[in-house]
Image: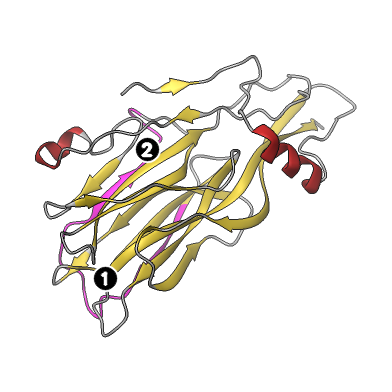
Amino acid sequence: MTRQVVRTRKVSLALSAALSMGLALGGGFFEQAGAEPYRTEMMLHGTPEDSKVSGYSGTRRKLDVDDNEHAMYGISSQERRDNPCTVWIGTESINDSAKNTGEIENLCGGTPNSRAIKAEYRDTMEHGPRVFVTGIRVCTNKKGTRVKGFQLRGVQVYEEPDDNPPSPAPVVSILTAGRININTEARSKYVNDSTNPADFRNNCKEWHKWADCPYSGQVAIGLTAHFEAGKEPRSLTGVALQCRYISRSYVAKG
């Protein structure tokens, strides 16, 4: 699996007609500054839109950061008595990779006692800064009742030097995340893979379909977690992404 990055002089994202529509609805992505030099800022816009569910639907719990600055870079879960009853998402500022936060849902009814499984795009090592989630899929146990693994795919946003004049097109680059086949006998090969980070438990038996952001140019800003009904601990059964458009704006310095 190779990591394919599309670059242009302004590092453009193939946003297609869907993002063009977002341009029209959002009143434009760029401020045509009247003086040089310029600085660029990232922005999230549009109403959050849900992806499909990977896994199975259940009682919904939303995890998100209520601002216009943070997007999702990772997910984690722990168990109590074999029930995946916690889910955590990591989020990062789209303008400052040092600003991280997160949200957690705990339906364990007590302290989880398993190791955490975690799939994430990390700012260091193989991933680099500003990689955000655009797709997720889960692995369940043999009965299909409990989530036992996660895998991600995403896009990387590249910083540009200051002093560049405004571009006539949005300037986000895409990290192409292709599909891979999971071999449960060689898990370490796929944990935090550079393109499709994944982590899963030994009783992960069935990988479900991808749940992707509905349109090109969107990134996940949160997660809708689905849990089984009944008494705690309640198992995670599926997940869906909450997505918004991401783009750059140019602003004159000073």
Task: Indicate left or right for 113 with 7 as reference.
Answer: left
Q: Mark 1: few, some, or many residues within 10 Å (few <14, many ≥20)?
A: many
* SS category of the residue bearing label 2: loop
Please give left or right for residue 11 compared with residue 144 in the image.
right
Prevailing SS of the magenta stretch? loop
Identified by mark 2, the residue type is Arg
| Mark 1 secondary-structure assignment | loop
Q: Which residue is mark 1?
A: 235
* Range drawn in magenta: 101-126
Amino acid type at mark 1: Ser
x and y, in percent, of residue 210 in the image = 39, 47
How many circles with numbers are drawn on the protein? 2
- Of circles 1 and 2, the one toward us is 1
Q: Quadrant of residue 250?
A: top right
Residue at the limit of the structure toward the bottom, as seen here: 231
Q: Nearer the viewer, residue 223 or 252?
A: 223
In the rendered image, residue 189 lying in the magenta stretch gets the answer no
In front of the other: 166 or 81? 81
Circles 1 and 2, Cβ within 8 Å, touching? The answer is: no
Q: Position of residue 193 (x, y in %)?
A: 28, 33
Above or below 112: residue 39 = above
Say which quarter of the image contains residue 141: bottom left
Q: CA distance from mark 1 to mark 2?
A: 27 Å
| Residue labelled with disc 2 | 122
Is residue 245 shown above or below 85? above
| Residue that appears at 14% across and 42% down | 184
Residue located 78% across and 35% down the image:
30
In the rendered image, the quadrant that contains the C terminus is top right
Residue 42 in the image: x percent, y percent? 65, 39
